[in-house]
Amino acid sequence: MSEIKNPLEIYAALAKTNCGQCGVPACMAFAAAVLQGQKQLVACPYLDPAVCGQLSQRIVRRRSLEDDHQQAIQTLQREVAGLDFSLVAPRLGARLVEGNLAINCLGKDFLITPSGQMVSDCHLNHWIYVPLLHYCLLCKGKKPQGEWVPYATLPGAAEWSQYFSHRCEEPLRQLADAHRDLVFELLHLFGAKPVTLSGGADHSLVILPLPKVPFLINYWEPEEGFASKLNILLDRSAAENINAQAINLLARGIIEMFRQLILRHSRDGKLF
């Protein structure tokens, strides 16, 4: 019995009415959702039960991004479970709280349990969870030196540098342009400290997403005839305390958090 790996094979067996009774607006979208495990064939009211049973036995569900993230988290959890928290806490800049690692992220404590689970009063998602677990495993305790470098110059960052630029720096620049006061108010709320550096940025702020992984955010306001600019620099020591992919996720998580907070607190409830 051949395996079904293409949604077109499922679509061929459907009535193609696009009735929407399955909860998806089109039959092709329903077929794709079935293959990804988001829908069951029985949700289609026009599909014969016998055909439904035959197709179900042949479906090879595609892995989703969520599947990959969950697998990555489970692997990291198992590795973290093998750590002696009393030994790693000092090099992480973390505290022991009732046997858990308390790691401060943007002024908020996130607890890592001995089994690698994460507990916090804040919303938990993989953007924060995966970097925190990587930090537990990789941090050598290198003290930041105040030598700021572009993300792309860090070891292993080359394949992620475009993503970092387009999905982290550029969205934050757009948010700062549209909601300047609110963005900088949020940054200060999460512990950002202004610094004076050469380079002429209108705003230079250091934030601590992780105790030994500071970010420097530089923002140049738009002027007549010139667009705004924004960059996020890393301390050169970051390479000793975390990997490039985790930094990318961490920055992306901060941007997503800011987007949600701005939607909630902006006057018109809009990003742009």
Image (tube, helix red, strand yellow):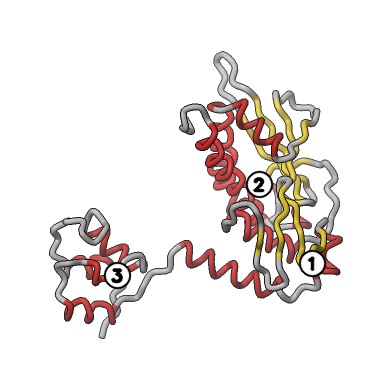
Provide the residue designation for mark 3: 40
Q: What mark, if any, has residue 244 been given in the picture?
A: none
The answer, for residue 158, to whether it is visible in the render is: no
Q: Nearer the viewer, mark 1 or mark 2?
A: 1
Q: What mark, if any, has residue 152 been given in the picture?
A: 2
User: Is label 2 in a helix, a strand or a loop?
Assistant: helix
Marks 1,3: beta carbons within 8 A: no
Q: Position of 156 compared to 53: left or right?
A: right
Residue 92 screen position, x and y as percent: 80, 59
Residue 59 screen position, x and y as percent: 30, 76
Using the image as rendered, state which of residue 135 and residue 107 is in the foreground: 107
Given the image, on which type of amino acid does mark 1 rest?
Glu
User: Is label 3 in a helix, a strand or a loop?
Assistant: loop
**Mark 1 or mark 2, earlier in chain:** 1
> For the residue carrying disc 3, how many other residues have a C-alpha within 10 Å: few (<14), some (14-19), or many (20+)?
some
Residue 96 screen position, x and y as percent: 82, 63
Quadrant position of residue 32: bottom left
Q: What mark, if any, has residue 98 been given in the picture?
A: 1
